[in-house]
Image: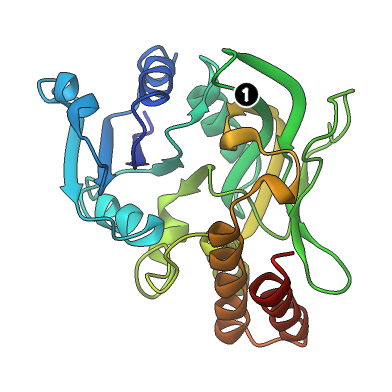
Amino acid sequence: MHTIAVIIVTHNSGAVLPLCLRALNQQTLAAREIILVDSGSDDRCFLNTLQQQEDIQIISTNNVGFSRANNLGFTRVTPDTDFVLFLNPDAFLPLDFLETAVAIYREYPLAGIISGKLHGYDIEQGRATGRLDSTGIFRKWYGRWFDRGHGEKDRGSYDTPSFVPALCGALLFCRMNALRSLSGPPFDPDFFLYKEDIELSLRLRKAGWKLLYHPRLSAFHCRGWNRTRKAVPTGQRMMAAISEILLYKKHPSPYMLWALLKYFLVRFFAV
């Protein structure tokens, strides 16, 4: 029997976490452990009801950022665990997700991470948006990374399994051996927020692992559902631009020119 650990980083996640955990608790293949890392929530009352659940470990820390919080959770994973799922609290799994993911791994021995078709979910309306959130992360010819299919209506597109350049950090089902093959923790602690999933993807690919998108896997993801760039606060766009520069410092590339241009446009023109 394969063993699975789930790591969830929370930050003011009271509105979405119960739905996330309900889906996990109803899985046809149960996770052995669920590790919640609260990274500086303003009010942690939403965690109080979980304190007595034996299958959930809760770690509270300051707002150390997404990468460091996930790494902290990773240090608590039982050593003989086979798979680790990094899951956002605003991502909700179908009941057979874990069982299906393990079965897919048997077909793809070189896959270090697998993920699937993420569908948009409007938490305020309590329903799916009918649009895609991510089917893997790709890069434009000039360097911009983007979630393939984001905002598109799901008409049965992207229904072929494929190896992709990167995968969305909201849902990363990882082979433990792949994570152990890396030097250092899974996520680069220099990334506070944004692009840490791409950086992990690049390191795993350099280590010889494949990143698999498989449409047999699916989940819902809220992501705040800002459909346009203008709806994203400038501060968040600036943080994303800084993270992109950091990404190309870590992985040198001519695409650094795009990252610098993006930073310039956000800082001086709020684009």
Residue 159: quarter of image: top right
Instruction: Point out residue 217 in the picture as x, y percentages from the top left corner.
Output: 64, 28
Q: Residue at x 36, y 28 (%)?
A: 1
Mark 1 nearby-residue class (10 Å; few <14, some 14–19, many ≥20): many
Q: How is the image coloured?
A: rainbow
Q: Residue at x 37, y 26 (%)?
A: 17
Question: Can the viewer see residue 197 in this picture?
Answer: no
Q: How many marks?
A: 1
Q: Residue at x 26, y 38 (%)?
A: 35
Instruction: Point out residue 264 in the picture as x, y percentages from the top left corner.
Output: 70, 80
Instruction: Point out residue 91 in the picture as x, y percentages from the top left corner.
Output: 51, 30
Name the kind of residue labelled 1 in the image: Tyr
Q: Which residue is mark 1?
A: 121
Residue 92 horizontal side relative to residue 259, left or right: left
Q: Give the residue furthest to the left.
A: 52
Label 1: which secondary element: strand
Residue 29: quarter of image: top left
Question: Can the viewer see residue 186 in this picture?
Answer: yes
- Classify the position of the C terminus by image quarter: bottom right
